């Protein structure tokens, strides 16, 4: 059944687990994620970005979501808008059947210029007032992560919070978070605590303390009823980089957020963990492998099926690691 983010994360908070939010753009990804959720009895969050909506068309996304709910009626699914850039983007997502929307007012509508306090509170509040009337959940964001535009991480020195990220705007201020939630009434809050979007987060192997866990812990203590969201949470596994590069890819050496760090976040109130890059890498590695191993192959199913199998494997790992398995 389709459920809201609030319903799902309230349960996650009660039972102390986290829920991976995988980005989808197509049928293959939706089916692969649901196959994993079904096999482990895990609730799922599928999120679509504005880019996904432009790629697939809202009506197609709506029907893909309706389809998986019909195929897996026993699995709770939250359908979420990732990084809405304006109230209008959130409203049209709700019209398309999303049960949860993110109003990312930490950036201006161009999705790259950092916004000021009044702008962020203003647009976010506008969305919560409207969404809550229809029982739809809202995620807001306070603090600026690494660049969405380039996909380049801010914390490139391998030391996370100790390095460039100690700059004020790159770490969410806990007292401001309290004020922001009080003013906007968001159900979930994305906080900046050392992660960044894309594959290139850290240029050296993290020493195990890339996230500002003290910030997460303090925000959670001050806002026990607001679910925290970790963006940029791909782990960028070395195995996936190796498969891509073994079959002709040219990814530069890189490190993501270690799963243990995310598990530490879950102990401190992180309930939604956004993963897109790992999804892309799992699928692309298999597409590259099949096309290189058999250059005569031209049936898309021959490479998309292994791509789906690799994605299902990744999702199952995260459902197990975050404690989502068995919670449906
Ligand atoms: O944070 C952004 C997500 O990874 C979605 O990326 O805008 O290229 O679909 P996208
Ligand atoms: P990754 O690039 O680390 O997968 O982050 C995705 C994300 O935060 C989507 O909102
Ligand atoms: Zn994000």
Image (cartoon, helix red, strand yellow):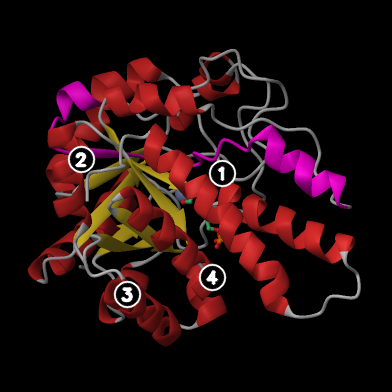
Q: Nearer the viewer, mark 3 or mark 4?
A: 3
- First along the sequence among labels 1 and 3: 3
Q: Answer whether labels 1 and 3 touch (C-beta < 8 Å).
A: no
Q: Nearer the viewer, mark 1 or mark 4?
A: 4
Q: Which residue is mark 3?
A: 71
Question: Assess mark 3: CB under 8 A from ligand 1?
Answer: no
Q: Residue at x 45, y 23 (%)?
A: 261
Q: Which mark is residue 197?
A: 1
The part of the chain drawn in magenta is 220-247
First in residue order: circle 3 vs circle 4? 4
Q: Residues within 10 Å of mark 4 (few under 14, many from 20)?
A: some
Element carrying mark 1 = loop
Q: Is residue 82 visible?
A: no
C-alpha span from label 4 to label 2: 27 Å
Choose mark 2 or mark 3, whichever is in front.
3
**Left or right placement of residue 167 versus residue 228 in this view:** right
Q: Residue furthest left?
A: 133
Q: Are marks 4 and 2 in contact (CB under 8 Å)?
A: no
Mark 4 — residue? 28
């Amino acid at each position: 059944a389709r459920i809201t983010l609030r319903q799902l994360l309230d349960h996650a908070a009660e039972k102390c687990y986290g829920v991976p939010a995988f980005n989808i753009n197509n049928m293959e990804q939706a089916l692969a994620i649901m196959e994993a959720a079904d096999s482990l009895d895990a609730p799922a969050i599928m999120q679509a970005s504005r880019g996904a909506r432009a790629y697939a068309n809202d009506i197609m996304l709506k029907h893909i979501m309706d389809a998986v709910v019909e195929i897996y009626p026993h699995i709770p699914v939250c359908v979420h808008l990732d990084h809405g850039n304006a109230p209008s983007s959130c409203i049209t997502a709700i019209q398309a059947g999303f049960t949860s929307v993110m109003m990312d007012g930490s950036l201006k509508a161009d999705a790259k210029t950092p916004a000021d306090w009044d702008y962020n509170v203003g647009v976010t509040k506008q969305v919560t007032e409207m969404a809550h009337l229809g029982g739809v959940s809202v995620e807001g964001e306070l603090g600026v992560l690494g660049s969405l535009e380039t996909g380049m991480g801010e914390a490139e020195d391998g030391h996370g919070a100790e390095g460039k990220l100690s700059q004020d705007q790159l770490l969410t201020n806990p007292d401001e978070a309290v004020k922001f939630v009080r003013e906007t009434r968001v159900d979930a809050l994305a906080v900046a605590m050392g992660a960044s979007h894309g594959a290139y987060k850290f240029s050296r192997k993290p020493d195990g303390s890339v996230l500002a866990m003290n910030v997460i812990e303090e925000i959670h203590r001050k806002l026990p009823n607001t679910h925290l969201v970790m963006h940029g949470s791909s782990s960028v596994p070395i195995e996936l980089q190796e498969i891509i590069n073994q079959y002709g890819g040219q990814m530069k050496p890189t490190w993501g957020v270690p799963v243990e760090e995310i598990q530490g976040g879950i102990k401190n109130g992180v309930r939604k963990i956004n993963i897109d890059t790992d999804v892309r890498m799992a699928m692309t590695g298999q597409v590259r492998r099949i096309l290189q191993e058999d250059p005569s192959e031209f049936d898309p199913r021959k490479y998309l099926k292994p791509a789906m199998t690799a994605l299902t494997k990744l999702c199952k790992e995260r459902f197990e690691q975050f404690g989502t398995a068995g919670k449906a």
